[in-house]
Amino acid sequence: PFSNTFAPVEVLRDCYDQALAVADVVGLAVGTRPDCLPLKTLDLLAEYDRQSYFWLELGLQSIHDKSLNFIQRGHDYQCFLDSYEAAKERGLRICVHLILGLPGESREDILATAEEMAHLKVDGVKLHLLHVLEGTPLGDLYKQGQIEMLEMQEYVELAVDFVERLPPETLIQRLTGDGPRDILLAPLWSMNKWEVLNAIDAELERRGSVQGDRYRG
């Protein structure tokens, strides 16, 4: 697996120490999967949290197991919860990565993910839009017309719906993303990231809304 914690603790310690030894590096943001966080690794990460600026970034994508199975994540939502709770017990700040627009997910499904992140009071989130790349199983399904992609305005409205439901103190570290242009099949509108971000700002202004307006904590 491609993960920044998929190695023995002594190997990870050496890698992290090398990173922190670089001039002007003040901390670490370690991105990983919830199924690559044994307790010994979490204990190691807690050491770095005590001695430097530290974030743990966890890829979840969705709370719905049907979606996790479809994109072949190799873990379920309970696996995420177990790792999340163990990390929080150690005082780690956690940023959760999520995808909007997964095949088969309704608006209600996506907002259920938002409500669950609000319930967990995650420290940060990074929102990604689903994008399809050449040479992938998802790309094959897209070419066969078996999956539909969000239009830009649909994504913008979903992103704002999501943001409205998060606690005001949750840090939103990303609102969109895009794939490598040379292999990106869809959505092509995602290549203009500033247009998407400006549209999200405009939708918030149109609604007279801000982060947390629909938070039910």
Image: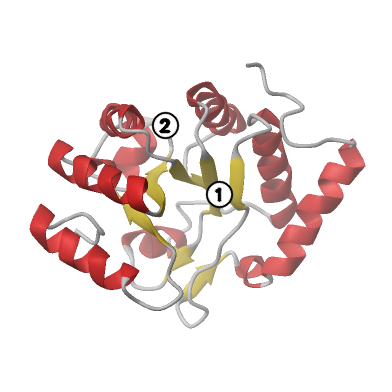
Image vertical order of residue 196 relative to residue 48, above or below:
below
Find numbered disc 1 in the image and state the secondary structure of the residue it sits on.
Answer: strand
The span from disc 1 to disc 2 (Cα, nearest Å) is 14 Å
Badge 1: few (under 14), some or many (20 or more) residues near its Cα, within 10 Å? many
Work out whether residue 217 or residue 149 is closer to the camera in this orientation and state it: 217
Q: Is residue 100 visible?
A: no
Reading the image, the residue beneath label 2 is 63
Instruction: Check the image and tell me how it is coloured.
Output: secondary structure
Amino acid carrying mark 2 in the image: Ile
Q: Quadrant of the N terminus?
A: bottom left
Q: Position of residue 149 (x, y in %)?
A: 57, 54
Q: Is residue 58 visible?
A: yes
Tell me the residue at 33%/43% (across/down).
Answer: 70
Badge 2: few (under 14), some or many (20 or more) residues near its Cα, within 10 Å? many
Among the 4 quarters of the image, the one containing residue 193: bottom right
Reading the image, the residue beneath label 1 is 127
Give left or right: position of 13 versus 68. Answer: left
Find numbered disc 2 in the image and state the secondary structure of the residue it sits on.
Answer: loop
Tell me the residue at 24%/62% (across/down).
Answer: 2
Amino acid carrying mark 1 in the image: Leu
Among the 4 quarters of the image, the one containing residue 8: bottom left
Q: Position of residue 142 (x, y in %)?
A: 45, 60
Residue lying farthest to the top in this orientation: 217
Image vertical order of residue 126 relative to residue 115, above or below:
below
Q: Position of residue 67 (x, y in %)?
A: 38, 38
Q: Position of residue 49 (x, y in %)?
A: 35, 47
The number of numbered discs placed on residues in the rendered structure image is: 2
Q: Quadrant of the C terminus?
A: top right
Tell me the residue at 56%/54% (across/down).
Answer: 129
